[in-house]
């Protein structure tokens, strides 16, 4: 038996053991088994991925993030790991780190509408409204029927004081998902009043998809 085959069989045994424990919701034991396996095979992506899952189940996001860091260092082209890493940073309110990781994921796969949406949210968290708007624009080019993306686009327009565009975007969001009215009713009412009182047609110089 070659060294490569022996390693492959060893990894399979570790993963099978961990999977069995995880199915029984014994995540601490599964994580221990995977950690022991990682000591033998420190760069194995499948073991690292399962440790991400276990740590998330155990409410240990920092440990999950550490495993994602190891994956991206070992395999810099692992676009799903970069996306997961970005999302994990956002959960931890680490917006700039999230932006960096999501940007890397999009460099590898620029046609992922969900990652563009996450990048927009990260920019919103930093109050970078123009950057957020651009990310939502890219997301809508790929998925024009995402109500929540239209909604977030409206929020960015609102803070940039493009009030008519904000109103048009939120109405588009409503047309796709009427349930969003309950989420946005108060601030959209204020927006509608502002548009009526100002009576000014705001013309945006920001490129956006047709609504």
Image (spheres, rainbow, N blue to C red):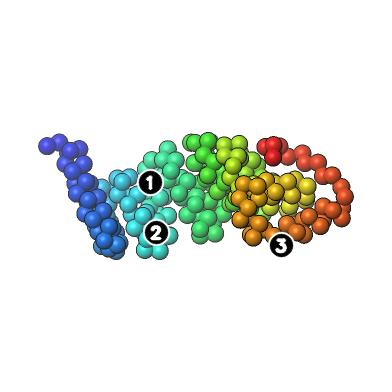
Q: Quadrant of the N terminus?
A: top left
Could you tell me how far apart the alpha carbons at marks 1 and 2 are, in whole angstroms? Answer: 16 Å
How far from the left and from the top, in percent, is residue 33? 24, 57
Closer to the chain start, of discs 3 and 2, is 2
Q: Is residue 68 left or right of residue 184?
A: left
Location of residue 127 with respect to 104 vertically, above or below: below
Viewer-proximal residue among 122 and 153: 153
Dot 3 lies on which element?
helix
Viewer-proximal residue among 95 and 166: 166
Can residue 142 be seen in the rendering of this structure? yes
Mark 1–mark 2 CB contact (< 8 Å): no
Dot 1 lies on which element?
helix
Closer to the chain start, of discs 3 and 1, is 1
How far from the left and from the top, in percent, is residue 48? 33, 50
Q: Is residue 86 left or right of residue 180?
A: left
Location of residue 27 with respect to 173 vertically, above or below: below
Viewer-proximal residue among 63 and 209: 209
Can residue 32 be seen in the rendering of this structure? no
Residue drawn at (67%, 46%), measured in percent from left and top? 172
Between label 1 and label 2, give the one nearer the viewer: 2
Q: Residue furthest left?
A: 1
Report the disc number at residue 111: none
Report the disc number at residue 71: 1
Report the disc number at residue 56: 2
Quarter where residue 54 is shown:
bottom left
Which residue is the site of mark 3?
186
Dot 2 lies on which element?
helix
Closer to the chain start, of discs 1 and 2, is 2
- Classify mark 2: residues with Cα within 10 Å, few (<14), some (14-19) or many (20+): some
């Amino acid at each position: 038996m070659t060294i490569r085959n022996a390693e492959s069989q060893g990894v399979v045994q570790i993963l099978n053991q961990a999977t069995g424990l995880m199915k029984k919701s014994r995540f601490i034991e599964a994580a221990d088994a995977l950690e022991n396996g990682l000591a033998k095979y420190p760069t194995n992506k499948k073991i690292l991925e399962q440790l991400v899952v276990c740590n998330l189940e155990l409410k240990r996001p920092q440990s999950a993030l550490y495993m994602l860091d190891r994956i991206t260092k070992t395999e810099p082209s692992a676009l799903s790991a970069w996306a997961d890493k970005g999302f994990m940073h956002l959960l931890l309110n680490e917006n700039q780190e999230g932006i960096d990781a999501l940007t890397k994921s999009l460099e590898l796969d620029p046609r992922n509408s969900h990652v563009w949406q996450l990048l927009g949210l990260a920019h919103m968290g930093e109050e970078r409204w123009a950057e957020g708007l651009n990310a939502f624009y890219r997301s809508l080019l790929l998925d024009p029927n995402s109500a929540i993306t239209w909604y977030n686009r409206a929020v960015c327009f609102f803070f940039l004081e493009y009030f008519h565009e904000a109103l048009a975007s939120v109405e588009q969001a409503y047309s796709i998902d009427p349930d969003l009215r309950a989420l946005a009713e108060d601030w959209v009412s204020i927006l509608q009043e502002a548009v009526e009182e100002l009576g000014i047609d705001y013309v945006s110089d920001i490129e956006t998809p047709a609504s």
